[in-house]
Amino acid sequence: MKPLKYQSLSRTALRQLFLLALLLPVGAWAQYEFTGSPYNLWIQGTAVTDDNKANILSDNGATVSYDSENNILTLNNASIEGSYNSNGCIVSGGSSLTISILGENTISSTDSCTAILSIKEGSQALTIVKGGDDCSLTFQTGRSIRNFSSLSLTGLYWNEELSYEYATVSETDQGYRLMCADGSEAGFQESTAFAPILSDTLTYDLTVGGIQVTNKNASNIFGGDYPTAVYDNDTHTLTLNAIHYSGETEAFINIGSSIDELTVFLVGRSEIGYGAGYVFSAADECQVNIVTNAAVPGKLDYYFDNVYN
């Protein structure tokens, strides 16, 4: 028998092999990197199977579970930790994935690991939904969400520190990423001291009587039996209806706004004030308009040394 001869591959041949690898079905590539899950789903390096899907991490609270009939992964006060070398935190290779969150959840790593990763490279949709009240998901990973064809949120909002957009990195790349407003990829950076957070609370750029206005209290900001202060975020209108409120500190600001143009609608007679602060305090280039019903005009009495800051 003649000895085998080994020959080095030309650049052209190497390029052809690389292109062939790209054309292979994702399932073939996934089987090489990720194995053992009939649902193409891996949590913290653990393959999701029929035997463990009710309690994937085998913890007391069953914090991570999978509904295979409806293709829903539920995080219930879960703490998921992963690393780049241990195949990630949440890895999916199905046609789509829905994640439902309950309670306070965290996905973390000590390196550039991706929190939620698709191995379908731009052909798998991701939906994250609110599973219950007061729920959140914090990303403390180097990268947040990668390679899904789309990202949809139901009943959830990003934290206010940055504006996030799920977008492709370039026109020739299917590398969809969760991106920050400044063009960087969204992820936990120690230098910025904050992480991307999803929650069912949407914070508005408005405080009334020292209370931060959100989607949860906007219909009755002070929470009394009668809604004396109501905010409509669609029209950016704050309605004061016979409100009587005074600040507790000398420099108290009753209404603070960073909204581009806030309308304050007066109903009945309202009284606010007492102190050396301001009735209204708005950020630079923000405007406050005070209006009422001409037929039944409202009135605002204030007891401050200053009206507008």
Image (spheres, grey):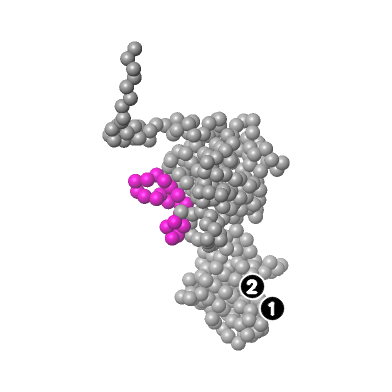
Residue under label 1: 248
Give the extent of the magenta segment.
166-184
Q: In which quarter of the image is residue 80?
A: top right
Residue lying at 60% horizontally and 55% vertically, measured from the top left: 200
Mark 1 lies on a secondary structure that is: loop
The C terminus - image quarter:
bottom right
Instruction: Where is residue 196? Give x, y as percent.
Output: 54, 55
Q: Which of 221 and 131 is in front in this view?
A: 131
Instruction: Where is residue 133? Give x, y as percent.
Output: 65, 53
Work out whether 216 lies above or below 269.
Answer: above
66 lies left or right of 165: right
Work out whether 298 lies above or below 153.
Answer: below
Residue under label 2: 210
Q: Judge whether residue 61 can be spotted in this image.
A: yes
Q: Nearer the viewer, residue 305 or 228?
A: 305
Q: In which quarter of the image is residue 203?
A: bottom right
Q: Nearer the viewer, residue 18 or 138?
A: 18
- Is 170 part of what is drawn in magenta? yes
The amino acid beneath tag 2 is Gly
